Amino acid sequence: MGSIRFQNVDKVFGASQAGVKVLDDINLEIGEKEFVAIVGPSGCGKTTCLRMVAGFEAPSSGTITVSGKVVSEPGPDRAVVFQQFALFPWKTVRENIDLGLRNKNLPAAERDRLIADALKLMNLESHAGAFPHQLSGGMQQRVAIARAYVLDPDVLLMDEPFGALDAQTRVVMQEELVRLARVNPRTVLFITHAVEEAVYLADRVAIMTRRPGRIKEVLDIKSVRLAENWDRFARIEDVMDQESFVHLRTQIWKSLREEKGAQGV
């Protein structure tokens, strides 16, 4: 469960004649428990792709399916992590994680077990009673990810989730997400402007053209990662020093520069 398929997807905002075409004939398949990152110039429709998978937007034409079912609205099989943490400031870490579970009408004992598992997964056990204002940005995003994971979704949709973090915290969260992807894999669609982040995290990277966005090419990162055994390194800087990593990063940057040049990518 959890495969995603874009089939001949177009998206136009506004009236048909005066509207703005954002996406043009998007075709992309994401396999079960595969981590795919989308990069592309600003305004190319990356986030629109994610919002359509989430069910927040509808394609103007074409279809999007998750687990073989056409997406027509949001559903519990998909969880979204946004750039802004979107935590309720008057609720504790535990209460924020519990929100989605309450909507599922689970018994209290079952909710307690699932929350405990999510807190442990994200190393938040000692912060369960804290309020968001008492946490760093990185810790708040951990809570947001825990809130998504606790619902046990087939698909995790992440829209530049580390974009609001400082550089050092962003690196820590990237390493944390790699750990999660290994120990508790989900199908992940990850939107980012950061090329290094995409190469480090993803199994494949889809590169989009300038608007109207199309899939220009898709690079297989996982085969390189496995061949070079990047997982033997505990730190991102050690992976980024590898010749294979540098080659992939450069390849993506060249492709993006062809679309929009150095400015605005």
Image: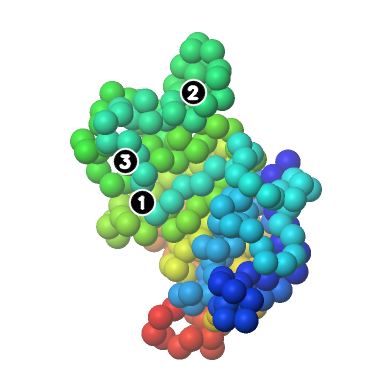
User: What is the secondary structure assignment of the residue under circle 1?
Assistant: loop
Q: CA distance from mark 2 to mark 1?
A: 22 Å
Q: Seen from this angle, which residue lies furthest right?
A: 68
- Near mark 3 (Cα within 10 A), the count class, few <14, some 14-19 or many ≥20, is many
Above or below residue 137? Residue 130 is above
Q: Quick check: can you spot residue 94?
A: yes
Question: Which residue is label 3 attached to?
Answer: 139
User: Which badge, 1 or 3, comes first in the chain's sequence?
Assistant: 1
Separation of residues labelled 1 and 3 (CA atoms): 13 Å
Display coloring: rainbow
Mark 2, Cα crowd under 10 Å, few <14 / some 14-19 / many 20+, is few
Snapshot quadrant of residue 255? bottom right
Q: Position of residue 146 (x, y in %)?
A: 45, 35
| Mark 1, other Cα within 10 Å: few <14 / some 14–19 / many ≥20 | some
Q: Which of the two labelled residues, at mark 2 and mark 1, occupies the earlier sequence position?
A: 1
Q: Is residue 26 or residue 221 the one in the foreground?
A: 26
The image quadrant where one finds the N terminus is top right
Q: Is residue 249 above or below residue 62?
A: below
The quarter holding residue 215 reads bottom right
Left or right: residue 93 versus residue 49 is left
Residue hosting label 1: 84
Q: Residue at x 65, y 51 (%)?
A: 34
- Tell me which residue sits at (62%, 54%) in the image: 53
Which of the marked residues, 3 or 2, is nearer the chain's N terminus?
2
Q: Nearer the viewer, mark 1 or mark 3?
A: 1
